[in-house]
Image (spheres, helix red, strand yellow):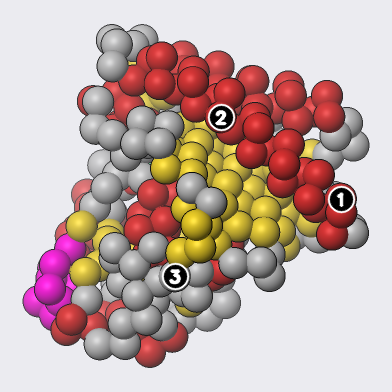
Amino acid sequence: MTEQEIDIYYKAVLDLVSLAGKVVNEGFSITKRVETKSGAADLVTEYDQRVEEILIKNLQEKFPTHKFIGEESTAAGVKADFGNDPTWIIDPIDGTTNFVHGFPFVAISIALAINKEVVIGVIYNPVLDRLYSAVRGKGAFKNGRPIKCSGQTDLALSQVAGEYGSSREPDIITAKCQNLRVIIEKVHSIRAVGSAAMNLCMVAEGSCDAYFEYGIHIWDYAAGDLIAREAGAYTCDPSGGPLNLLHRCILCTATKELAGQISPLLTHVDFPDD
Ligand code: LIP
């Protein structure tokens, strides 16, 4: 894949995300039809489905040989196939619970992977009008300006993001509460904005020093992983091994030193791979 081709894909997705953002904004402050997916706290609205349809339809028309992995298509039974072909990985609204409740941390998250490696990441929060983006090797940007992570190396001075997620299985809740408990004892503060994509952008721009979560999906973190790394952050599996986009978890830190301090504190929670 040439740089020129990647540039064409990048421009196309930037145009499209602003169109999709208008649809998200239309639905943000009105009452929506809400349904559940894997459990009572795993929500979906007609807007998630509409935005995903718009994104896939437009990208498919422009790039007919490309493949797609979308949160709502997968929920509707389409098999997620993460192979070597150029593949768009789409979360139409990351932070659906926020969207339902009118909490403004919602984001459209789109990644393009080629040979299973993410080369483009775009995360747009249309409510706050924040556009985060990265192309592999070219740095990370927020509304067109370069961003950098904090460079923090000391856990005691850190602000860490971590989420409870949507599973209501007692063992999973216990492990997640235990993780937040061990971290709060050691840090300045814990934050949870309710969206993996936004949490990763918070690390990318230095508002948080670290973020970890178990139970998320490839569409929640594929774009944010690239944006955070391009901003200088370090990402890995929370157990300390290399990050796997199908393994449903991430630890993202401003520095590798910080990952070394957080990983041994965590109770690792296994979810079936995507
Ligand atoms: C959400 C994630 C969030 C997690 C939620 C949910 P969705 O994604 O971004 O980090 O805690 O349970 O998975 O479902 O809003 O796209």
Three-letter amino acid code at the position of disc 2? Ser
- Is residue 56 visible from the viewing direction of this image? yes
**Secondary structure of the residue carrying numbered label 3:** loop
Q: Is residue 64 left or right of residue 210?
A: right
Q: Which residues are magenta?
A: 181-190
| Residue in the image at 66% along x and 66% along y | 138
Where on the image, by quarter, is ligand 1?
top left
- The answer to whether the residues at label 3 and label 1 have Cβ atoms under 8 Å apart is no
Q: Residue at label 3?
A: 148
Q: Quadrant of residue 62?
A: top right
Sequence-first disc among 2 and 1: 1
Three-letter amino acid code at the position of disc 3? Lys
Q: Is residue 16 left or right of residue 167?
A: right
| Residue in the image at 48% along x and 40% along y | 124
Three-letter amino acid code at the position of disc 1? Glu
Q: Residue at label 2?
A: 18
Establish if 251 lies above or below 66.
below
Q: Residue at label 1?
A: 5
**How far apart are the alpha carbons under marks 3 and 2?**
24 Å
**Secondary structure of the residue carrying numbered label 2:** helix
The image position of residue 55, as x and y in percent, is 65, 27
Sequence-first disc among 3 and 1: 1
- Is residue 247 visible from the viewing direction of this image? no
Establish if 127 lies above or below 69.
above
**How far apart are the alpha carbons under marks 3 and 1?**
26 Å
Sequence-first disc among 3 and 2: 2
